[in-house]
Image (cartoon, rainbow, N blue to C red):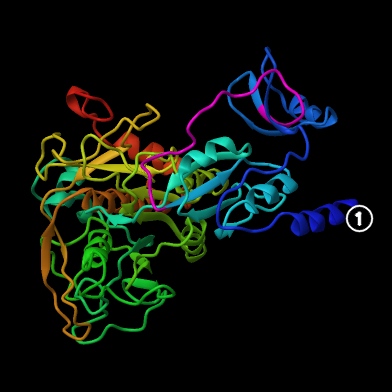
Amino acid sequence: MRGTVLVLSLFLIVPVVGAWQLPEPQSHETEWVVVEEDGWSHSEWVALSDEGLRPLRQISETEVLVWGENGAYQLGDQSLLRGPTSDGYLVVLEPRLPSHVQLDIITRFDVKNLQLAGPQAVAPTSFEVYGIDPVVFDRVPGIWWVEPLLETKARNSVSSSIMEHDSMENHPIWDLGLNGTGVIVGIADSGIELDHGCFRENATSIGEIGIDHRKVVLVNTTIDEGDNPGQSDYRHGTHIAGSIGCDLWHGNVTNGTSPSHGAQILFQDIVNESGWSEPSVDWLLAEALATGAVIHSDSWGDDTEAYTLRSAEFDLWHREVPWSLAFIAPGNNPSKFYEPANARNVVSVGGTWTDNNSNLYSASSHGPTEEGLRGNFIVAPAMGIMSAAADGNVTSFNDDMRASTGTSMSTPLGASITAVIQQMVQDGWFTEDGFVPSAPMLRVLLAMSAESMEGGQQGAET
């Protein structure tokens, strides 16, 4: 009952105002670092509570950041902003922060889009604020980091042959029936024109979307419907979907036929008239998982190298859900490596020339990350990739292809060839009884099937 009275009292005495204000000190509680020279065990972590300390996170092998009235030392002044200044910011609080401290921080700002972490939540509490000097956040204990609110942007049959056997001719794995059959791949992008020949049921009909459709099992139109002219990155989504699953209705192989043309697609339309309006990571990946998709392709992100909350959400999801693997485009700037491709548990796909050498596409982001970690996990052809062309008319039933270049194109191709690897596991090519492979297993098989790049091009400066 005492806790209830305390929370109600705080609501009464702390006004919600637009401008940041210095709080009246309520106690000497703040962030401290506690040191255990022999390293931390679970029992020692739990024992901190007996000393009146709330463990927040481990910051090194011997150091734990806690909330309380004492510790070995306090962290020095540091900038919490990850990235450039902006009109708005996403504020991320320390994990496991006591609820009354979270409330105290939240009520200091005019908060938008509050994502309050529950008692057992893995992701921390976060919220958006606008019109504030980011230096203010450096003086508020309990804030983990701050990131600018930026505009999400897209990242834009020879390729199939190159990835199959390092040659620009023939398709030996297709001759073996390895084309992604039996695999569902998730895609989140700008929309899909279902009347295109890569996806429609036959010459004159889109068909009924569902598990029995030859190509598309589900299109989520909660945010928007269609790859519409005038919207951000019009035609991007249709091209991406074609790279993953294009199989023309008449069955003929063309330059736009996907490496995994036997696969089916789950498409999530996340661009509307307001631009890129992507929901939270777990929303996208949970729907894909529920639909049977292990692989998920995402050729988009913000132009910042900072490890953002979205990067963390991708990592947290992959840690908790072994049967989920996101492929992400790192961007088209060789001196940058953008989020959320800098997440540690995703597959970042750089770009190469569309020939059978191992040279990086000159504009491909390649790493290392801002944290000094290796950049791309794999690379795939990125230049002049032929795939489905949207025409803005959902009744034209066109079969046209168009060329596009960038890591937006290499990423779905990386996801596509991985769908073929998934099919091999499911169909029993590795063991007599096939099974659905986990994300870690797919990563290992993908690494084993790839070739090393010469000259340290991958994730290095040369």
Q: Is residue 73 magenta?
A: yes
Residue 319 x %, y %? 54, 43
Query: Does residue 311 appear anywhere in the picture?
Result: no
**Magenta-highlighted residues:** 65-87
Quadrant of residue 300 within the rendered picture: bottom left
Most common secondary structure along the magenta stretch: loop
Q: Residue at x 40, y 29 (%)?
A: 371
Check disc 1 and give the amino acid type: Met
Residue 104 x %, y %? 69, 48
Which image quarter holds the C terminus?
A: top left
Packing grade of label 1 (10 A; few <14, some 14-19, many >=20) is: few
Q: Residue furthest right?
A: 1
Q: Is residue 56 above or below residue 414?
A: above
Depth order, front residue of 371/447: 371
Q: Is residue 72 magenta?
A: yes
Q: Is residue 251 above or below residue 337?
A: below
Q: Is residue 300 above or below residue 46?
A: below
Q: Secondary structure at mark 1?
A: loop
**Residue at the disc numbered 1:** 1
Quadrant of residue 241 within the rendered picture: bottom left
Depth order, front residue of 351/89: 89
Residue 156 x %, y %? 21, 54
Residue 27 x %, y %? 78, 36
Q: Residue furthest top?
A: 37
Does 311 sit left or right of 276 as displayed?
right
